[in-house]
Image (spheres, helix red, strand yellow):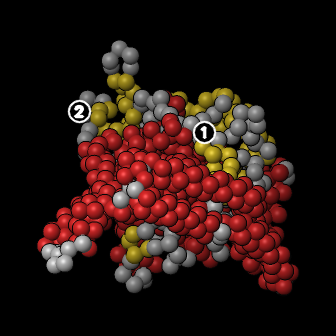
């Protein structure tokens, strides 16, 4: 569903740009379905409270007629009036107001429970669905946009559920009940009131029409200012290196002045909206008061002083709900735009998985047959069910083969062409090439972050499309190019590789990764709390923890994606020893900018523009003096 920009109520009741949501009725129904699914009785009770509160206010205004005509006016003709009846009437009137106040309080309390409960369920659904989305979604949507759904859009939905919809319903009920009550009291004064309401709406429309184009320009200028600030924040180092602070400031002042002018024009109209409506309301009140008083004095239409007072009270409370309807309707539309983005994310297709081969713990029985076991033995097997109901077990060895593989992130643009390669159990395969050659893409295909368009990838002779994705990825140890550490202790971050791992196993993994030494020097050792993606650690320490996290999973196949590309040479040596210990005896796919780290690879695959142009050992490729020779000698010169 597309979101368009149209004119709607803006600040202080004026009209500015608002998003137009296609199929708002369908979207609103979907939101209310989420609410009613768990809180239908609560919503019925809220509606009852709204009706009671609105009717109590109307009844209190109508009671003024009785108070004036039956108590106060007769007392003015008595020499020794008794105040007891009046006091009793005032108590009854206070009771009416008290009922309205209690109903409004109950409505607010219940709606808080309904709103927060609904948002909790919605956030849970949203996060659960987000976890099921394919990597492609996160590669094509900015993290800022995704976070905006959880923050801004969910918050606008909160305002709609807790405020806009209840106030909108309350305003409509109040308008209807007040209108019929005014008609009952005096149809003549009701006509006067409605004429003034029509004039108010006409003036509002004209002011909104005049201000709309300025609000649109204000939003555009605001976007330019925000974009400029964000750009300058990201480029502060460049600005300071070239000492362009004054030029940067001049550019900001120009954009800021444009925003000032458009905002001034827009708010020049919006700021007069409330005063105009207020004065028209006062004029309506005064006209009704004068007309009603004249009718009461002349005895026209059975008008009494009590009728005039009651009508004026209703008149005063009639204009505000009309303004509220317009404002809250706009708030609902704004919230629907946010809800549209929420549901759009929830409607994104989940990652598909047609696999049926699973990874299980295995052992050899007395007949030397591979069988499944519940205990962790360190031996893994692929469990392959067949159509006839039989099951076969195939030992996980770590043999990976690419056969005639083509791939493109978008169908019309192929980035890998005719890839043929194999990694035998225990081999170290290194991918080298220029930036954008397709090195990381190949590793993304092994773990099925993306699926190939043509060809086959086999894992221990099994087409990886037949293997369940969760089991496939569980068999892989991955150290990504951008190390990510979660908020928690060092121990918890290592254990993330295998949640059931014991403390002793995590410490052993840290030792294997050469991370144990620096961890023990931390303030609280393995219990040191990490926050902000491990901001209190160096880049090398963060990568050592990532290696330890992969080690505790004890995978037969490793993917190391440029794990030493952003650390110094001394730290690289430490990290390299950790990786060597981790790779020993495992099939390993390595990508590294520093080609000196892959000299001992069993096979080096050279990629260029998505094609394999060379392969062989380090010595073989150096002897050829081809692309690898150029990369290697150039890399050494840079280092």
- The disc placed on residue 22 is 1
> Helix, strand or loop at disc 1?
loop
Residue 609 at x, y percent in the picture: 79, 44
- The disc placed on residue 82 is none
Residue 275 seen in the current view:
yes
Q: How many neighbours does mark 1 have within 10 angstroms: few (below 14), some (14-19), or many (20 or more)?
A: some
- Residue drawn 42% across and 62% down? 297
Residue 195 at x, y percent in the picture: 57, 51
- The disc placed on residue 366 is 2
Q: Quadrant of the N terminus?
A: top right
- Residue drawn 28% across and 45% down? 44
> Helix, strand or loop at disc 2?
loop
Q: Residue furthest top?
A: 388
Q: Quadrant of the C terminus?
A: bottom right
The answer to whether residue 287 is above or below residue 616 is: below
The answer to whether residue 124 is above or below residue 544 is: above
Q: How many neighbours does mark 2 have within 10 angstroms: few (below 14), some (14-19), or many (20 or more)?
A: few
Horizontal arrangement in the rendering, residue 488 relative to residue 476 (left or right): left
Q: Quadrant of residue 509?
A: bottom left
Horizontal arrangement in the rendering, residue 500 relative to residue 635 (left or right): left
The answer to whether residue 308 is above or below residue 623 is: below
Residue 376 at x, y percent in the picture: 29, 47
């Amino acid at each position: 569903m597309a979101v368009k920009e149209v004119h709607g109520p803006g600040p202080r009741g004026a009209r500015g740009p608002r998003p137009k949501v296609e199929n708002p009725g369908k979207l609103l129904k979907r939101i209310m379905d989420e609410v009613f699914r768990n809180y239908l009785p609560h919503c019925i009770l809220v509606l009852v409270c709204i009706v009671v509160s609105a009717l109590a206010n109307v009844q209190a205004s109508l009671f003024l007629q009785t108070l004036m005509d039956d108590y106060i006016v007769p007392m003015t003709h008595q020499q020794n009036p008794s105040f007891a009846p009046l006091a009793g009437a005032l108590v009854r009137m206070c009771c009416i107001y008290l009922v309205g106040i209690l109903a409004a309080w109950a409505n607010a309390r219940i709606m808080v429970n309904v709103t927060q409960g609904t948002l909790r369920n919605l956030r849970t659904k949203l996060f659960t669905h987000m976890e099921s989305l394919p990597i492609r979604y996160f590669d094509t949507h900015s993290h800022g946009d995704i976070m905006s759904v959880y923050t801004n859009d969910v918050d606008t939905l909160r305002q709609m559920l807790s405020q806009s919809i209840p106030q909108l319903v309350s305003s409509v009920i109040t308008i209807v009940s007040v209108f019929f009550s005014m008609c009952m009291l005096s149809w003549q004064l009701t006509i006067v009131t409605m004429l003034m309401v029509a004039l108010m709406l006409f003036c509002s429309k004209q002011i909104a029409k005049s201000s709309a184009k300025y609000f649109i320009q204000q939003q555009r200028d605001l976007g330019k200012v925000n974009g400029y600030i964000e750009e300058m924040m990201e480029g502060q180092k460049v600005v300071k290196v070239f000492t362009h602070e004054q030029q940067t400031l001049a550019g900001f002042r120009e954009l800021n002045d444009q925003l000032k002018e458009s905002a001034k024009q827009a708010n020049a109209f919006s700021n007069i909206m409330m005063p105009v409506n207020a004065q028209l309301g006062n004029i309506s009140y005064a006209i009704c008061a004068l007309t009603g008083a004249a009718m009461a004095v002349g005895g026209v239409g059975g008008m009494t002083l009590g009728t005039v007072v009651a009508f004026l009270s209703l008149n005063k409370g009639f204009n505000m709900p009309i303004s509220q309807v317009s404002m809250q309707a706009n708030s609902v539309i704004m919230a629907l735009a946010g809800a549209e983005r929420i549901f759009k994310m929830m409607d994104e297709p989940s990652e598909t998985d047609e696999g049926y081969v699973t990874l299980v713990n295995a052992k050899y029985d007395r007949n030397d047959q591979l069988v499944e076991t519940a205990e962790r033995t360190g031996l893994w097997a692929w469990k392959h069910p067949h159509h006839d109901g039989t099951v076969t077990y195939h030992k996980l060895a770590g043999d990976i083969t690419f056969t005639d593989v083509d791939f493109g992130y978008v169908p019309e643009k192929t980035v890998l062409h005719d890839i043929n390669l194999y990694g035998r159990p225990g081999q170290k395969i290194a991918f080298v090439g220029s930036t954008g050659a397709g090195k990381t893409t190949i590793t993304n295909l092994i773990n099925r972050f993306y699926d190939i368009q043509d060809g086959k990838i086999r894992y221990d002779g099994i087409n990886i499309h037949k293997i369940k994705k969760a089991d496939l990825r569980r068999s892989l140890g991955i150290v990504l190019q951008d190390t990510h550490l979660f908020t928690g202790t060092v121990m918890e971050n290592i254990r993330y590789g295998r949640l059931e791992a014991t403390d002793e196993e995590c410490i052993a993994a840290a030792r294997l990764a050469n991370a144990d030494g620096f961890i023990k020097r931390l303030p609280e050792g393995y219990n040191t709390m990490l926050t902000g993606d491990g901001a209190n650690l160096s880049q090398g320490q963060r990568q050592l923890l990532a290696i330890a996290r992969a080690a505790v999973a004890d995978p037969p196949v490793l993917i190391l994606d440029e794990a030493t590309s952003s650390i110094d040479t001394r730290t690289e040596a430490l990290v390299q020893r950790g990786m060597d210990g981790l790779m020993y005896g495992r099939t390993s796919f390595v990508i590294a900018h520093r080609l000196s780290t892959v000299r001992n690879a069993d096979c080096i695959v050279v990629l260029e523009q998505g094609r394999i142009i060379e392969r062989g050992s380090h010595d073989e490729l150096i002897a050829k003096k081809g692309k690898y020779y150029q990369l290697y000698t150039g890399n050494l010169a840079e280092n």
